Image (spheres, rainbow, N blue to C red):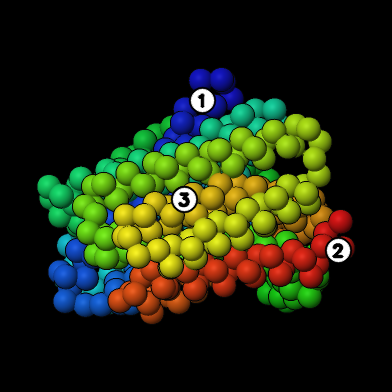
Amino acid sequence: MTKQQKFQIMLLMTIMFFVGVSATDIYIASLPRMVLDFHSSPSVINLTLSSYSLGVAFAVLFVGEISSRFGRRRCLLLGVLCFSMAAFLIAILPSIQLIIVLRVIQAFGCAVIIIVPRLVLKDCMDEREQITANGILLMGLIISPAVAPIVGAYLAKFWGWRSCFASSGTLGLILVVWGYFILPETNRNPLLHFQRPSYYLKTYFQLLTNRMFLALTGVYAAGVAAYFTFIGISSYLYIDHWHMSPQRYSLLYLWLSGAYLSGNQIMQYLNGKHVSSVKIIRFGVYATFVGAVVVGAAWFIPSPTLAMVVVTAGVLFMRSSNALINPPTQIRIMSHFEQNSAQALGLNMCIGFAVSSLAISLVTLFARQPLTGLVLVSGFFALTVVCSYRFNRKILY
């Protein structure tokens, strides 16, 4: 494969990854508007978030195996097509119940977009090229939350929130056509058959009864959930409660992406100084807790403006701590469970998405008192991060 072909594939995978991870960010500022349009409640509208997380949680367990059996190209193109068709239907259907179901279907497509591009890059590049390509690919995790909410807020302002889904669907279709013409089948050693179900059940049971796996996954999942608590309630807090415009609210995600990037730079610096992965995780654990304490302090501040500043500062702290926790925990899981690294990473991500869905559902119960909900639920998960680490720190070392 030539360098030009590799570059085209890397570019395609990166844009696919960006579109996939932006599926929630692009309409996050429109949640209060959707409550009004459907004459519904935040708890119902937020099911479009939590059902999506659950759908991804379930699908990441098996999409990698399916792509190994039936081919990366076929799986990826069908996954993006599924994602796009669901987005188009969401843009036109009048029923929130059907939209929630379609978000689950869209989540299956997103799981393909999250998992399969990494496998495509692994198939067609050597280790050095993979490191560079994955670094570019994962920039989507930073760029998408920064750009997508702003784009979505302005799309909703001029054409309504349904245009957010229509634009996602259009981009997805363009990528399917592009991929059809330039993406070859990269897996040269396909699976001849799936393993027996008993094999996967046995593997997952072994992982779920292993204290090292539970400790690392507990820290990872609770840390992500603490931040997703903010995702679930922030539009109601900033737009409805503090009367900020959706466009100004969307700019907050630029700061959040900057916070994650800063945390990533700190993680890279510590890693360059040969600080162990467990110590880096420890820094992230206590940074998460400090961020939750700062958010909690806003509960006692009577001034809405000052409370907004304090909450934002605390959430930025929690977001930067995600970058200190997520990569080291997942790398440690893959290295410790090398023989079953794919199943271990898939189950880790599954639990992370599932717990994030739980966090969104819990905080939505406080939609009428969003600051209270944010303080209590994010505080609970931040405390869970600390407990998961402290009760298992001897095992981690």
Q: Would residue 319 be seen by someone viewing this image from the given angle? A: no
38 vs 265: above or below: below
Nearest to viewer (mark 1 / mark 3): 3
Secondary structure under the numbered disc 1 in the rendered image? helix
- Dividing the picture into quadrants, the one containing residue 222 is bottom right
Q: Please name the residue shown 27% across and 43% down the image.
A: 151
Q: Nearer the viewer, residue 80 or 286?
A: 286
**Earlier sequence position, callout 3 versus callout 2:** 3
Secondary structure under the numbered disc 3 in the rendered image? helix
Tell me which amino acid carries mark 3.
Ala
Q: Nearer the viewer, residue 89 or 193?
A: 89
Q: Would residue 240 be seen by someone viewing this image from the given angle? A: yes
Residue 10 place in picture, x, y as percent: 51, 32
Tell me which amino acid carries mark 1.
Phe
| Residue position marked by numbered label 3 in the rendering | 313
Q: Quadrant of the N terminus?
A: top right
Disc 1 packing (10 Å; few <14; some 14–19; many ≥20) = few
| Residue position marked by numbered label 2 in the rendering | 395
Residue 324 place in picture, x, y as percent: 65, 47
Secondary structure under the numbered disc 2 in the rendered image? helix
| Residue position marked by numbered label 1 in the rendering | 7
